[in-house]
Structure formats: structure tokens, C-alpha cells
């Protein structure tokens, strides 16, 4: 369960806070988030009824992934797990909290924003940390600097994250998921405007996915034709040309295939922030995938949707960074 929880948080890419004192409202918010594409919630233990809200969500949605947040000691962690928490989030790194969760096989995301705290967390067997308060602690600049010595560590930035500043976090490979209360706006909760929370969830999912035009793929008949096609685009637009095993790229815009591939007319690639995240959300919307391609490092570089549109195969790719 411990690994599964982190895996699902990574796929969803978001960790919304459900911070209310009314358990019925907590249920409505969880439903609204799920309607908007987010099946993970964090209930911070910041009021007397927080554990009640957590249990209420647990009973109403047995399949939702529910975390307890703002857990600052081992006893609180155990009560949260008893109340039905699938994972625990802490603002800081308290070994007692970490060990309590580990003793129950429950995932723990403790706060760590310095090299010292991360080293302590690694010594406890962890590789995912809450980066809190994210913007105050240096934001993505600090996260990227910490990835130098800690290449395998990933972060959940929270605290001050908003629709205005979430995009660079969502694009970063160092970020497992983006967290915060901006996905459950206070004014919507006050007005019991659950559809506004669904809309915020959808907006956050869209920002987290970051779908944008990737490239157009041309089905050429052979290597010479492909090289020639890519060269023409490269000359016209001064795109750099690069060759990979199956094709030539002109910049990031055009891929000329060395032999006919998927799609009667070729393919259209839609770029995203994270293949795992994009596949998860598209599958959740009912789309199926028929073919996946990894590079030599084992990273997925293409995922073909089963449906074609207008004679074009559609595949996901990761955003091109020159
Ligand atoms: C947390 O506990 O994760 C933070 O308080 C969330 O911060 P935010 O309200 O600024 O999103």
C-alpha cells in the first residue's frame, strides 16, 4: 500500500487539501474533486473534527486515496491511520512520525527543504518529501539545486502554490505532485459551491498535464525520403535536424519517419509534462493505449492512443527541451 499510494499520487499529479470542520462538507468536496478528475485528497489535522471528516470520506468513497496532513507526531499518525488514512503528510521531518507510519506499512511524505533534512529522510528509507512552504523556501530553484546531490529524490511542493505559479512545478521531473488548498478555494467552500471546486480541480488537472502541440509525424517511404523531408523543414525554418532510430526530427515540430508508421496520414504528437500522469488521466477519461515506446534509458517517449483522428495516429510525448 505504501508504494501504491505514492504511485497513485504521482499519476494524479496533485494533492488537494480538504480543510473543513464539517464532515458532510468534506464528503461533498471529495465528490467534487473526484468529478473534476482528482481521486486523492489530503485532510489536514487542523481542527477538532478533522479525523471525523477523514473517516466520513473513507466510508463514502472506499476507493479514494485519502491522506492525513499536518501530522506532527507518531501518536497522531497512528490515530489517522486508525481513522482510515492511506498515507500521511507532515510539515516537517519527525522520525517518530515516519517510524509510526512505516510500522503500519503506510506511506509518509514528511517535509524536508534542506540537505540535512533530506539526508535524514533518506536514512529513514524515504525518497519523497513535501517541500513546504514551497515558495518561501526557494521554489523550483531550490528544488533543482537539491536534485544535484539527491538525484533520486522527488518533492511535493505545497504552501503558497497557486494557479498562477504551479506550471513550472508541474513541468519539473523533480516534482511528484503539486499540493495545496488552491484546488479547494475557501470562497467556494463557504458558499457550498461544489461545482466551483470541480471546475478548480479540472483546471488544476489541465495545468498539471500541460498538454500542448508536440509535433507532426510524416510517413515517408524510406530513409532518403525522410532525411530529405526533415532537411526541407530545417532549411525553411532554420530548425536543427537530429536523427533517431526510426526518424529524423526538424526541431521539435516535424518528425519524418524512415518507413510508414502508425496512421494513414501520419501522426500528431501531443506533448505533456509527464507520461505517467497523462496516461493515467486519459485512461480515467476512457481512452485506451495501443503502443508504448521507451528510449535506451528506459524512459517512455511515446504512448499511442488506440483511436486515430482524421487518418492521424495520436501519441503522447514529453515536452521537448532543447
Ligand atoms: C499544507 O499544509 O500543505 C499547506 O498549508 C498548504 O498550503 P496552501 O494553503 O498555501 O496551499
Image (cartoon, rainbow, N blue to C red):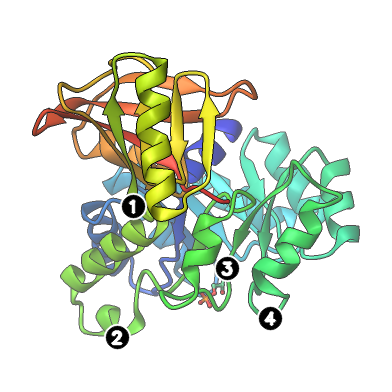
For disc 4, does the CB lie below 8 Å from ligand 1?
A: no
Instruction: State if disc 1 and disc 4 touch (CB < 8 Å).
Output: no
Q: Is residue 129 left or right of residue 11?
A: right
Q: Nearer the viewer, residue 271 or 131?
A: 271
Q: Can residue 44 be seen in this view?
A: no
Question: x%, y% of residue 301?
Answer: 48, 31
Tell me the SS state at disc 4.
Answer: loop
Dot 3 beta carbon under 8 Å from ligand 1:
yes
Secondary structure under the numbered disc 1 in the rendered image: loop
For marks 3 and 2, give the CA distance.
20 Å
From the viewer's perspective, tell me whether residue 95 is left or right of residue 194: right
Residue 291 visible in this rendered orientation of the protein: yes
Q: Mark 2 points at which residue?
A: 187
Of residues 181 and 215, the one nearer the viewer is: 215
Spatial distance from mark 4 to mark 2, Cα to Cα?
A: 24 Å
Residue 250 image-quadrant placement: top left
Q: Is 135 above or below relative to 67?
A: below
- Please report whichever mark, 4 or 1, sits nearer to the chain's N-terminal start: 4
SS class of the residue under badge 3? loop
Name the residue carrying label 3: 158
Label 1 to label 3, Cα distance in Å? Answer: 22 Å
Q: Which residue is drawn at 66% across and 72% down?
A: 139
Q: Nearer the viewer, mark 1 or mark 3?
A: 1
Write down the residue under mark 4: 136
Which mark is on residue 62? none
Q: Residue 211 carries which label?
A: 1
Amino acid at each position: 500500500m505504501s508504494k501504491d499510494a505514492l504511485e497513485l499520487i504521482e499519476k494524479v499529479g496533485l494533492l488537494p487539501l480538504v480543510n473543513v470542520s464539517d464532515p458532510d462538507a468534506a464528503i461533498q468536496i471529495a465528490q467534487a474533486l473526484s468529478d473534476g478528475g482528482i481521486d486523492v485528497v489530503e485532510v489536514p489535522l487542523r481542527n477538532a473534527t478533522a479525523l471525523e471528516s477523514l473517516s466520513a470520506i473513507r466510508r463514502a468513497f472506499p476507493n479514494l486515496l485519502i491522506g492525513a496532513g499536518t501530522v506532527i507526531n507518531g501518536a497522531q499518525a497512528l490515530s489517522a491511520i486508525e481513522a482510515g488514512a492511506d498515507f500521511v503528510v507532515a510539515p516537517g521531518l519527525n522520525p517518530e512520525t515516519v517510524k509510526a507510519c512505516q510500522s503500519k506499512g503506510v506511506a509518509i511524505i514528511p517535509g524536508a527543504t534542506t540537505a540535512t533534512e533530506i539526508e535524514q529522510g533518506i536514512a529513514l528509507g524515504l525518497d519523497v518529501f513535501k517541500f513546504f512552504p514551497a515558495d518561501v523556501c526557494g521554489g523550483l530553484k531550490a528544488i533543482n539545486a537539491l536534485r544535484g546531490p539527491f538525484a533520486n529524490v522527488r518533492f511535493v511542493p505545497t504552501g503558497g502554490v497557486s494557479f498562477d505559479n504551479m506550471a513550472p512545478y508541474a513541468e519539473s521531473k523533480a516534482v511528484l505532485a503539486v499540493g495545496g488548498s488552491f484546488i479547494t478555494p475557501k470562497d467556494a467552500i463557504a458558499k457550498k459551491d461544489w461545482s466551483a471546486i470541480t471546475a478548480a480541480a479540472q483546471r488544476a488537472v489541465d495545468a498539471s498535464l500541460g498538454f500542448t502541440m508536440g509535433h507532426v509525424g510524416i510517413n515517408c517511404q524510406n530513409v532518403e525520403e525522410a532525411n530529405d523531408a526533415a532537411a526541407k523543414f530545417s532549411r525553411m525554418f532554420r530548425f536543427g535536424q537530429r536523427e533517431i532510430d526510426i526518424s529524423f526530427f526538424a526541431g521539435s515540430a516535424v518528425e519524418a519517419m524512415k518507413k510508414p508508421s502508425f496512421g494513414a496520414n501520419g501522426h500528431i504528437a501531443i506533448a505533456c509534462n509527464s507520461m505517467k500522469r497523462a496516461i493515467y488521466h486519459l485512461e480515467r477519461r476512457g481512452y485506451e493505449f495501443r503502443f508504448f515506446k521507451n528510449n535506451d534509458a528506459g524512459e517512455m517517449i511515446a504512448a499511442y492512443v488506440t483511436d486515430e483522428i482524421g487518418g492521424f495516429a495520436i501519441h503522447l510525448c514529453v515536452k521537448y527541451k532543447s
